[in-house]
Image (spheres, rainbow, N blue to C red):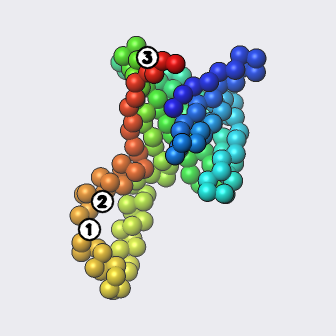
Amino acid sequence: MRFEYDASSDKFTVVFDHNGEPIRIPVGFERAEFFKYDLNGEIYLLACEGELRENEDGEPVLKLRIPCLEMPCERRIKIYFTQKGESIRINWNEVPGRKLLIQGIEYLMKTNLNKPFINTLASKIDKDYFEYRLDRVINPTFTGTRRKF
């Protein structure tokens, strides 16, 4: 991940690396910046709103809100700059989140228990471990250190 700022256009961009490919997310601080994202050949229209704050420990936090304008979902990212900017911690949250997904899965399991495949699957799943793994997928946390070029 890296940050880019173009002074001539006053544009701030967060660049994430995904499988060796850069994902450029323009960040709007006064108003959302709109951009298109190609996910396996499907193009989605997204927006990004950014906000720079401090947490209770006085660490700067860059908050990003990235709604998908064509679907009812949103990615929320908080980037914490720790140890005087030498390292970062990134928390990702998906909306709708884990709670809604768990409720949907529980509903499917209850209403389909008479089906042999669902019944077998339900009997083999450790619910706590499943929720832990789901949370790690939907709400991951990453850490990194500053790299000088």
- CA neighbours of label 1 inside 10 A, class few (<14), some (14 to 19), many (20+): few
Name the residue: 76% across, 17% down. 8
Indicate the quadrant where residue 81 lies: top left
Residue under pointer 1: 125
As helix, strand or loop, the secondary structure at mark 3 comes to helix
In the image, taking residue 29 as reference, residue 137 lies left or right, namely left
Pointer 2 and pointer 1: residues touching (CB < 8 Å)? yes
Disc 2/disc 3 C-alpha distance (Å): 35 Å
Q: Indicate which disc, 2 or 1, sits on the residue closer to the N terminus.
A: 1
Q: Which numbered disc, 2 or 3, marks the residue closer to the eye?
A: 3
As helix, strand or loop, the secondary structure at mark 1 comes to loop
> Where does the image place residue 15, in percent across and percent down from the top left?
58, 33
Disc 3/disc 1 C-alpha distance (Å): 42 Å
The amino acid marked with disc number 3 is Gly
Name the residue: 24% across, 72% down. 124
Work out whether residue 87 can be spotted.
yes
**Up/down of 21 relative to 81, above or below:** below
Residue under pointer 3: 85
Indicate the quadrant where residue 13 lies: top right
In the image, taking residue 69 as reference, residue 107 lies left or right, namely left
* Mark linked to residue 130: 2
